[in-house]
Amino acid sequence: MNFFYEELPDTVNVGGERIKIITDFREYIRLLDMLKDQELDYVQKFVIIQQYFLDDVTVDEEAVSALSGFITMNLNGAEVVEKDDCGNLQEKPKKNLFSYSIDYPYILSGFLRDYGIDLIDIKYMHWWKFRMLFDGLSDDTEIKQRIMYRSVDLSEIKDKEEKKRIKKIQKSIQLPSESLTDYDIGNAFM
């Protein structure tokens, strides 16, 4: 897909049919919050996820998978796997590098600084546009700095002082282990 001349998707493919879905970025942040809510049971989550489909559809594993693909911007259903040094396929568990709720002030300020977009006042933004802009934030924004420090593998740092410095930063910006990113939706619902 080339979004310079194609429109951002507003449907997902379920059972060979194009099913209209909600596309506003706030709704997907809300969905991710809902999925990690331990007070909601499976049935309550199921009822909520049904509301993301605007057309009549049976919400089953295929529908949830299609919505998950929309959330991760992977509509073709290809699984993302990495190869190790020997060329063997391996699935790497994704480490949570940000939280929409905990890092909200830094995401908001990054959008304001880089794009002049106030995420509080904007009436609508497509989820994919939000994600593309989020990914494109400048490396020196606070949210990108937090993501960078959270992603550092301390075992790869040889200098003891640098390791100590980064470990201290990581501890100060550490996320709770239950924070759910948009990469975890399929696992959270099923």
Image: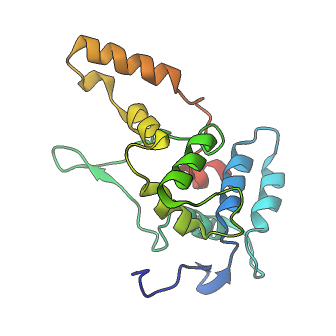
Q: Quadrant of residue 179?
A: top right
Q: Eyeballing the image, is 188 above or below 119?
A: above
The residue sitting at the left extreme is 86
Report the residue at 58% width, 70% height from top. Answer: 66
Which one is in front, 164 or 187? 164
Does 125 sit left or right of 159 as displayed? right
Which residue corresponds to the image point at 62% horizontal and 79% vertical from the top-left?
10
Q: Is residue 170 above or below residue 85?
A: above
Q: Residue 112 placed where, x, y %?
A: 56, 54
Q: Which image quadrant: the N terminus?
A: bottom left
The front one of 19 and 42 is 19
In this picture, residue 46 sits left or right of residue 89: right
Vertical position of residue 33 compared to residue 52: above or below: above
Nearest the camera: 141 or 66? 141
Q: How many marks?
A: 0
State the residue in front, 121 or 128: 121
Residue at image location 52% in from the left, 49% down from the top: 110
Say above or below: 150 vs 86. Answer: above
Colour treatment of the image: rainbow
Q: Position of residue 56 (x, y in %)?
A: 78, 81
Q: Position of residue 107 (x, y in %)?
A: 56, 47
Residue 5 position, x and y percent, is 43, 88
Left or right: 46 with respect to 87?
right
